[in-house]
Amino acid sequence: MEDLLSADGRASGYIDQAIELIMTYAPKVLLAIVTLIIGMWLINRLVRLLDSKLGKKDPTLNKFLCGLVSAILKILLLISVASMVGIATTSFVAIIGAAGLAVGLALQGSLGNFAGGVLILMFKPFKVGDVIEAQGYLGSVIEISILYTIVNTFDNRRVVIPNGDLSNSSLTNLSAYETRRCDMSFGIGYNDDIDKAKSICKRLIEEDERALKDPAPLVVVGGLGESSVDLTVRVWAKSGDVWPFYWDMQERVKKAFDAEGISIPFPQRDIHMYKTE
């Protein structure tokens, strides 16, 4: 009989403890669940709003920022919900910090590329479609990711360049401006008519529609070489026309000089042989 009463007392004590726990934690759990649901809804709404504002301006940067903002806000929300339930978040944050430090040390190179990608996306030294020269490669940018930039060279090679290298070294953006200057040099013989040669160059430039009138083309004597008088020719053209114009001018000037009797000298050496007895 005493055992039954003792068992009933313990059961009653357990029930009282359970009721007390429920009364203590049920409101907290319910409030945490409501907070989690409302918080996730607000985060998703904020991310969609950010996506609609930045999506048309820069899709690559927009995708990265939306993902980063969403991840940070969700982590903060989970920590807040855990503290509402009564879970000690101090040790939890310390564990996250230690894990972050370990991952950072293991992924130093990738983090450097990540930081470089952020800088590239923010400051935009180049964009998709630009022709750049960097890290020994010349080509067109086809993709900018958060870690790497992909460049297609003009001989159809696909080059993947880490963003850390691009952000910490100099590069040349050949598409930054609509126009570029095309520099050329043509050598003529010392016995040839300089004014005639300059006139031929000017005529060929005027006949080519790709040559811009403003700034005006320049044809001058750039130097006196060992075996030639060097004419310096500088012409402005649209960025996409520079190399086709340059190659065409090389051929047309050679043919025009030949037709007009203007010589293009090349290095020569005289060899004298002496016979000794």
Image (spheres, helix red, strand yellow):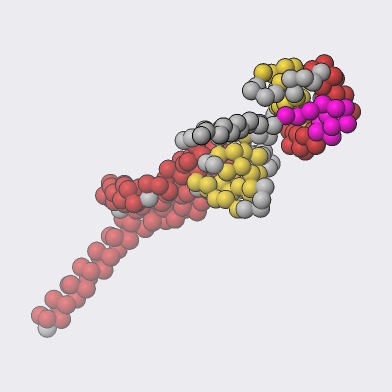
The reply, left or right, for residue 112 in relation to residue 276 is left
Q: Please tell me whether residue 162 belongs to the stretch shown in magenta.
A: no
The reply, left or right, for residue 68 in relation to residue 261 is left
Using the rendered view, name the quadrant where residue 56 is placed. top right
State which quarter of the image contains the N terminus: bottom left
> Seen from this angle, which residue lies furthest front?
277
Which residue is drawn at the image coordinates 65% and 44% (left, top)? 140
- Which of 241 and 37 lies nearest the eye of the viewer? 241
Span highlighted in magenta in the image: 253-265
- Residue 216 visible in the picture: no
Using the rendered view, name the quadrant where residue 204 is placed. top right
Which residue is drawn at the image coordinates 41% and 51% (left, top)? 78
Q: Please tell me whether residue 260 belongs to the stretch shown in magenta.
A: yes
Q: Is residue 192 above or below residue 160?
A: above
On the image, the x and y values in percent for residue 43 come to 53, 47
On the image, the x and y values in percent for residue 91 come to 26, 49
- Residue 165 visible in the picture: yes
Which residue is drawn at the image coordinates 74% and 17% (left, top)? 220
- Which of 205 and 23 lies nearest the eye of the viewer? 205
The reply, left or right, for residue 194 in relation to residue 58 is right
Which residue is drawn at the image coordinates 52% and 41% (left, top)? 135
Q: Is residue 171 above or below residue 144?
A: above
- Which of 260 and 4 lies nearest the eye of the viewer? 260
On the image, the x and y values in percent for residue 147 come to 50, 48
- Give the number of marks: 0
**Taken as a whole, is the magenta stretch helix, strand or loop?**
helix
On the image, the x and y values in percent for residue 14 come to 23, 69
